[in-house]
Image (tube, helix red, strand yellow):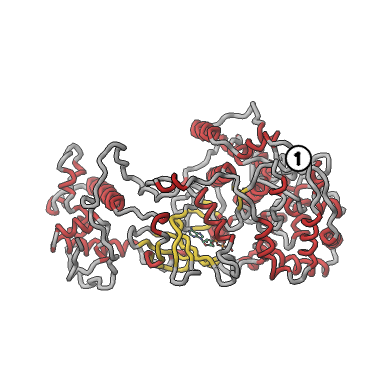
């Protein structure tokens, strides 16, 4: 097929699927996209392919039958990738300096992946009850109703990471694992400095001042003064050091004599000082320790708008009334829970608290309680876009990521995954809609609702309880589709391969309509695997009972090399991530070291990644307008009572949060 014909066909297919998929930002998200619904999907899917008369019908029916007649397992369980994880190619170009540093850092952290290499291979015991349970799941028409409970029970596992001692937790401070994060840019006092007594600590505005009575009638305020209003007492700031002339803001009458460049430099200096003052004021607020005082109330946040409604919760955009920080608030759905707090929510909170300190993983700020005891919210850092929406937006404008942009996205994704896997966390639901990206181009992995910790390979008993029904269908690895007894980090790496292909194609690589169809699509593209190249495939239930047609490999190469979408080394990386044999699949660390990242064009900086106005921010007031209004109010306040204005700034209380007529600070 010629490339243009190929393109057309591909795009037609994509469009059909896209129209089906376009409601994906909310609760109407395609059912095929939801691993959690797979019980229901599976029933529906079986109907679908029974009605089809093509080749895949034969395969699908066999596939289906195989699920009804599970064979018993008594082979070795060896899902660990011990030997391969240890090896590092000697001849690899070691890359740029910063990546070398990263490798050094990584080698200091003991990776569970390399850790696994010391584990002994063990014989797997027989598990008739496991099989029976799976058998029940397939045959029971009411399984969906019970599935969540069943899956949760299957999934319970002890953490391989030690918990902290209670005594350690009682002494935490800023930046401890369990303490609040120090605002950036605030200097840490030397260890031997005198502690600040309660009397010396500046008073905190206990009641957030509401913007009820904002004085609107201020249009006559002098614009020049308004532009300068942020500079009040800047002179005081600069008294100690007059070496830099931008440390002192000129008098209003001298302002007009300045050149445009000087004005810009002055404004930048003002901004810096303002940020510093704000950070200092926030750092002086009494620290709130959830461990000691319990969770805060949701009333501490003003809800700005709804961002999305997912399977397990609604997500809002909110503002912390103490610090003005904009956050995403995820409200966990508890309505259907009969057995207390949902385990998926507990897992998500637990995993994010563990892993969220990494730049490429969404960071949790705190857990909040709502009005009812069943209202539980998680406050996370707010990230403006998700990758799926960004890709859709770009696609609608006929745009693609440049190679340097693809590399930056992949480096960030792999770096977050490497961190997670080093902490023994499997994500199990990686897909573009669960990757967030900020206005400044920082990619963050989100939605840890299906994540869980995994154990060492030696602990086969525990690992066997992992449910195979995880990961959204299009991103689900081939071993998961063929029903393994146990699996590990390679399932996430397969999803990473699918995501890399999506960054290049601007649409998902394998768009199966059901599980058998997904397997068909993968085999057609990658070639049907054989037992020489992947000996352990014999241990997968579906492989043992279905006779798959023998597809030749080469489809992936034809698509990416034939169409020149990737160069040779880029294709090598993609192929390594999509290796059929999970033992041969690249780990996150190996992928990060791949030579593709060292070749020209190198990864662009984050701020060179594309951004669009986020849907989630659309009903926020335009920032410029807000800023002007605030400037005028601050100018008025400063004129009326400079002392109070200075205090206001110290406590980061914005002028538009106070009543200008009867403003009182509490001491
Ligand atoms: N920190 C955040 N900042 C901004 N938006 C976010 C954030 N976290 C989540 N969202 C938005 O909310 C949507 C749903 O969030 P999330 O995926 O965590 O919920 P879920 O109930 O697990 O959804 P799903 O149905 O995809 O499993 C995301 O696709 C994203 O658009």
Tally of marks:
1
Residue at 80% across / 60% down in the picture? 132
Residue farthest to the top, as pictured? 90
Label 1 sits on a secondary structure element that is loop
Q: Is residue 406 visible?
A: no
Q: Position of residue 384 (x, y in %)?
A: 46, 58
Q: Nearer the viewer, residue 169 or 537?
A: 169
Instruction: Mark 1 and ligand 1: say if the CB distance to the nearest ligand atom is below 8 Å.
Output: no
Q: Nearer the viewer, residue 354 or 459?
A: 459
Q: Is the residue marked by circle 1 packed among few (<14), some (14-19), or many (20+) residues within 10 Å? A: some
Question: Quick check: 527 above or below 45?
Answer: above
Q: Nearer the viewer, residue 547 or 629?
A: 547
Q: Position of residue 609 (x, y in %)?
A: 49, 49
Q: Position of residue 378 (x, y in %)?
A: 47, 60
The C terminus appears in which quarter of the rendering? bottom left
Q: Is residue 334 visible?
A: yes
Residue at 25% across / 56% down in the picture? 651
Residue at 79% across / 70% down in the picture? 47
Q: Position of residue 345 (x, y in %)?
A: 55, 60
Left or right relative to 28: residue 10: right
Residue assigned mark 1: 122
Q: Nearer the viewer, residue 233 or 560?
A: 233
Question: Quick check: 256 above or below 138?
Answer: above
Left or right relative to 468: residue 622: left
Left or right relative to 137: residue 339: left
């Amino acid at each position: 097929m010629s490339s243009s014909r190929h393109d057309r066909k591909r795009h037609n297919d994509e469009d059909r699927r896209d129209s089906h998929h376009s409601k994906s930002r909310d609760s109407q998200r395609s059912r095929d996209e939801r691993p959690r619904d797979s019980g229901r999907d599976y029933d529906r899917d079986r109907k679908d392919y029974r009605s089809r008369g093509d080749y895949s019908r034969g395969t699908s029916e066999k596939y289906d039958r195989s699920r009804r007649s599970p064979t018993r397992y008594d082979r070795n369980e060896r899902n660990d990738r011990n030997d391969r994880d240890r090896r590092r190619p000697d001849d690899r170009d070691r890359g740029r300096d910063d990546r070398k540093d990263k490798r050094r850092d990584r080698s200091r952290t003991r990776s569970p992946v390399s850790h696994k290499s010391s584990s002994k291979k063990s014989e797997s015991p027989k598990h008739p009850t496991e099989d029976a349970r799976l058998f029940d799941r397939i045959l029971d028409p009411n399984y969906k109703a019970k599935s969540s409970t069943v899956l949760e029970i299957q999934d319970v596992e002890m953490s391989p990471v030690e918990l902290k001692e209670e005594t350690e937790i009682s002494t935490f401070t800023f930046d401890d694992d369990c303490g609040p994060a120090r605002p950036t840019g605030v200097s840490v006092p030397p260890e031997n400095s005198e502690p600040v007594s309660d009397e010396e600590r500046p008073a905190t505005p206990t009641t957030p001042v509401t913007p009820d009575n904002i004085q609107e009638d201020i249009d006559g305020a002098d614009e020049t003064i308004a532009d300068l209003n942020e500079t009040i007492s800047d002179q005081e700031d600069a008294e100690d050091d007059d070496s830099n002339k931008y440390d002192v803001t000129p008098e209003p009458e001298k302002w007009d004599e300045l050149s445009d460049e000087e004005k810009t430099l002055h404004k930048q200096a003002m901004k810096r000082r303002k940020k510093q003052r704000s950070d200092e004021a926030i750092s002086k607020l009494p620290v709130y320790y959830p461990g000691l005082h319990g969770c805060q109330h949701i009333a501490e946040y003003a809800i700005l708008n709804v961002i999305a409604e997912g399977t397990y919760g609604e997500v809002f955009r909110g503002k912390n009334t103490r610090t003005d920080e904009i956050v995403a608030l995820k409200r966990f759905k508890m309505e259907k829970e009969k057995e207390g707090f949902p385990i998926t929510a507990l897992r998500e909170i637990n995993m994010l608290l563990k892993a969220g300190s990494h730049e490429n993983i969404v960071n949790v700020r705190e857990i909040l309680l709502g009005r009812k005891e069943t209202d539980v919210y998680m406050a996370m850092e707010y990230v403006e876009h998700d990758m799926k929406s960004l890709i859709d937006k770009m696609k609608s404008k006929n745009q693609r990521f440049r190679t340097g942009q693809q590399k930056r996205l992949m480096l960030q994704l792999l770096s977050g995954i490497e961190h997670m896997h080093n902490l023994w966390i499997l994500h199990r639901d990686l897909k573009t809609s669960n990757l967030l990206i900020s206005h400044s181009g920082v990619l963050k992995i989100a939605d840890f609702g299906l994540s869980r910790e995994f154990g060492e390979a030696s602990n086969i008993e525990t690992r066997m309880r992992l449910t195979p029904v995880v990961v959204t269908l299009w991103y689900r690895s081939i071993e998961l589709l063929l029903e393994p007894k146990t699996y590990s980090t390679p399932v996430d790496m397969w999803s990473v391969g699918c995501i890399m292909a999506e960054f290049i194609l601007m649409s998902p690589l394998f768009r199966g309509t059901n599980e058998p169809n997904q397997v068909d699509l993968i085999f057609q593209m990658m070639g049907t695997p054989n037992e020489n190249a992947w000996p352990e495939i014999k241990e997968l239930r579906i492989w043992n009972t279905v006779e798959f047609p023998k597809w030749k490999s080469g489809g992936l190469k034809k698509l990416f090399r034939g169409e020149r979408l990737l160069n040779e080394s880029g294709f090598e990386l993609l192929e390594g991530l999509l290796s059929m044999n999970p033992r041969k699949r690249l780990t996150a660390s190996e992928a990060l070291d791949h030579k593709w990242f060292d070749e020209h064009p190198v990864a662009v900086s984050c701020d060179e990644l594309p951004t669009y106005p986020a849907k989630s921010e659309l009903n926020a007031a335009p920032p410029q307008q807000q800023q002007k209004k605030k400037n005028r109010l601050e100018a008025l306040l400063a004129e009326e009572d400079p002392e109070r204005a200075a205090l206001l700034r110290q406590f980061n209380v914005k002028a538009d949060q106070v009543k200008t007529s009867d403003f009182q600070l509490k001491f």
